[in-house]
Amino acid sequence: MTAWHAHLEPHLRDRPEAIAFRDSLGEIWSFAALDRACGDLAALLASAGVRPRDRVVVLCENACVTVAALFAISRLGAVAVPVNARMQGGEIDRILSHAAPRIVLMTSAASKEAEDHAKRLQAAHGGTRWEGCFGCLDVAFLPETGATDGGDVPQDLAVLLYTTGTTGDPKGVMLGHRNLAFGGGASAQLRGMTARDVVYGTLPLSHVFGLASVLTASVMIGAEVRLEARFSAQKFYEALRSGITLVSAVPQMHALVMQYAKEQGLQSLGSPDLRYVSSGAAPLDPDWKTRAEAFYGVALQNGYGMTEATAGICATRSAIGDPDVSVAPPLRGVEVRWAQIV
């Protein structure tokens, strides 16, 4: 089994100074810088008592420090629980009650929402601020609930990802190191990703689409990721004209960037670098798909996934102009069984 964080090792060995991540806070990290950040943060987590199979919640936005936190937790054999900092306090409290983390890390420098959660949780539980080459993180300590002997936690568990799905209350989906490797590897293979790709990371890392199909796929192949903490159509448009080669988004994001361009008097993106665009999480309308392909100048790929399957289950490899709006057959290595539930 290759641990989640270990997918960084070939790039550290062969191209340590290549850019791995940039973010909207202005951070630019090479693979070597990411490795140092993970090491600093792993040492702090260990000194705080984090042990293998303990849960560590990361209340996060898309930022380099979030990536460092996720892989530092993996280094210790602990379980990362990424949670969107935009969630309400009551929703977060329910997750904390269920996940029973040892500590909570918060990316306060990345958003006011994360900062507000830090103030509330530190007031209730005690905490501090950690600073290092990873940047800064606010920390809340939850020792009464977070201790575990690991007896009921699978050995392979890397991430506990909460999803509301279609039934209301958040449920923790257990994703192992092999799950993440399969999901990321399948995404990278489907898209023909290489280390020369530059990926736009606007999908939340607290969601399986961003975590597996963007973050993990890029790390496995060594592509650069430009992380965006808060989506805006203008920033999306400008990024796509500034060297981005690959972008995955949801239909609303695609619609907003197309509308923004139209308001600027532009009918097409006109990017010479963009080669792959995909949409997920909602059905595609045939007419809208045609307009999107005319705007981007490349085929709009579609897919279907779920948290329990580490994102991708089905995905298209369509040519531009293909009228098919299905999600295509299952990906290689995926088995689908039809069942009637009464």
Image (spheres, helix red, strand yellow):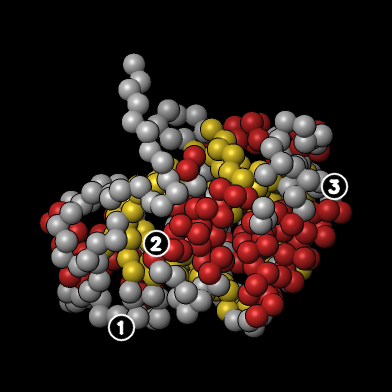
Q: Earlier in the sequence, mark 2 or mark 3?
A: 3
Q: What residue does disc 3 label?
A: 49
Residue 276 left/right relative to 81: left
Verify CB contact (< 8 Å) between mark 2 and mark 3. no
Q: Earlier in the sequence, mark 2 or mark 1?
A: 2
Q: What residue does disc 1 label?
A: 272
**Quarter-of-image position of residue 321:** bottom left
How far apart are the alpha carbons under marks 2 and 3? 40 Å
Residue at point 33% right, 53% down? 315
Residue at point 46% right, 35% down? 164
Residue at point 78% right, 66% down? 40
Foreground mark, 2 or 1, reads 2
User: Label 1: few (<14), some or many (≥20) within 10 Å?
Assistant: few
Q: Is residue 135 above or below residue 125?
A: below
Pinpoint residue 125: horizontal percent, then vertical percent.
76, 40
Q: Is residue 241 above or below residue 317?
A: below
Residue 13 left/right relative to 210: right
Verify CB contact (< 8 Å) between mark 2 and mark 1. no
Front one among 289 and 134 = 289
| Quarter of the C terminus within the rendering | top left
Amino acid of disc 2? Leu
**Quarter-of-image position of residue 203:** bottom left
